[in-house]
Image: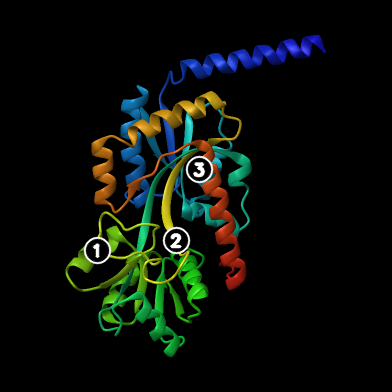
């Protein structure tokens, strides 16, 4: 028993020493999606800022495939030493709720920090005779099933948030899934689709050009990129808050001191003026906060979307 206690104490001291000297070599930031997308863009901004803040290179490693599963599982199986990190999103959290997965976000990972938060925008084809969320709800109730809404796929965040909107407003609209939301815009502009809960970056130019009509943003507060638009809550749907978000996680078992070090430097990096400016140009805002706050957020998000999936009877595609 004495020898076991001694070995445990030695291991604890070794872990503490490693944490104090961390980082001593480059860090991999796994992005479980292909390059050039929204997550990849955010990850590269964060990697550059953390490289400056931590004093070691943070290298983005795109591990796409399997709907993001390959990259996530790569991190879950990695050595828990803080040298392999994962960029996770709200979308990535939904996948294991829809499909069988080898990983469990809350069991296999330790949250480090929420990096960004980004609201969506309700956008319509201008031919739809509504100019506010209240008018949208009234029109949808008067014309059940007549409005077609697009999503980036069955069970995607855009699909789930629209189902949540339908549930909270007592409306009926018809879901039309696409393979990526970009493919839906020609049909939206052509009138085959009437509305989308869109990211601001993908719809901003069309909104400003008058080719799409924006009604509201889905966040808890107005978006800096679209300050004149009310939130859905302001527009009359209490409690409706949906954001895309990105955050950093590490494999479960990563020493607490290392998690706190990355968290500290991440929060510093998120205050760099160039980081804030880049996020704002993409319609996002820096988040930050403690690992505990991010863990609470993940739990809340998982519970919310699990309920939406169950209540709407949504099933994963086979």
Q: Can you name the residue that lies furthest to the right here?
A: 1
- Residue 2 is situated, as x and y percent measured from the top left of the image, at 80, 9
Q: Is residue 46 left or right of residue 189?
A: right
Q: Which one is earlier in the sequence, the residue at label 1 or at label 2?
A: 1
Q: Which one is earlier in the sequence, the residue at label 1 or at label 3?
A: 1
Q: Which mark is residue 228?
A: 1
Task: Report the residue marked by disc 2.
Answer: 241
Label 2 environment density (alpha carbons within 10 Å; few <14, some 14–19, many ≥20): some
Q: Can you name the residue that lies furthest to the left here?
A: 209
- Residue 249 is situated, as x and y percent measured from the top left of the image, at 50, 38
Residue beneath the point at 37% across and 30% down? 58
Evaluate whether residue 116 shows in this view: yes
The quadrant where residue 247 appears? top left
Q: Which one is earlier in the sequence, the residue at label 2 or at label 3?
A: 2
Evaluate whether residue 143 shows in this view: no
Task: Report the residue marked by disc 3.
Answer: 294
Residue beneath the point at 63% across and 42% down? 107
200 to 44, vertically: above or below? below
- Residue 70 is situated, as x and y percent measured from the top left of the image, at 52, 46
């Amino acid at each position: 028993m004495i020898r076991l206690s001694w070995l445990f104490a030695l291991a604890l001291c070794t872990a503490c020493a490693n944490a104090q000297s961390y980082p001593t070599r480059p860090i991999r930031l796994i992005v479980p999606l292909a390059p050039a997308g929204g997550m990849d863009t955010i990850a590269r901004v964060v990697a550059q800022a953390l490289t400056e803040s931590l004093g070691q290179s943070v290298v983005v490693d795109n591990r796409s495939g399997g709907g993001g599963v390959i990259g996530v599982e790569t991190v879950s199986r990695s050595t828990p030493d803080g040298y392999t990190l994962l960029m996770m999103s709200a979308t990535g959290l939904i996948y294991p709720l829809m499909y069988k997965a080898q990983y469990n976000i809350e069991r296999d990972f330790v949250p480090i920090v929420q990096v960004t938060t980004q609201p969506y925008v309700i956008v319509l084809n201008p031919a739809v005779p509504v100019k506010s969320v209240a008018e949208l709800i009234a029109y949808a109730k008067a014309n059940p099933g007549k409005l077609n809404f697009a999503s980036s796929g069955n069970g995607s965040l855009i699909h789930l948030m629209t189902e949540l909107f339908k549930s909270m407003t007592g409306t009926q609209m018809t879901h039309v899934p696409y393979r990526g939301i970009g493919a839906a815009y020609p049909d939206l502009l052509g009138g085959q689709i009437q509305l989308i809960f869109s990211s601001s970056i993908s719809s901003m130019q069309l909104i400003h050009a008058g080719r799409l009509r924006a009604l509201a943003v889905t966040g808890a507060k107005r978006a800096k990129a679209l300050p004149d638009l009310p939130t859905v809550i302001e527009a009359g749907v209490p409690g409706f808050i949906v954001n895309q978000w990105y955050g950093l996680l590490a494999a479960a078992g990563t020493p607490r001191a290392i998690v706190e070090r990355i968290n500290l430097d991440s929060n510093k990096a998120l205050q760099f003026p160039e980081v804030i400016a880049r996020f704002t140009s993409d319609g996002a805002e820096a988040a930050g906060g403690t690992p505990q706050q991010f863990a609470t957020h993940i739990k809340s998000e998982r519970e919310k979307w699990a309920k939406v999936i169950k209540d709407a009877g949504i099933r994963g595609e086979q």
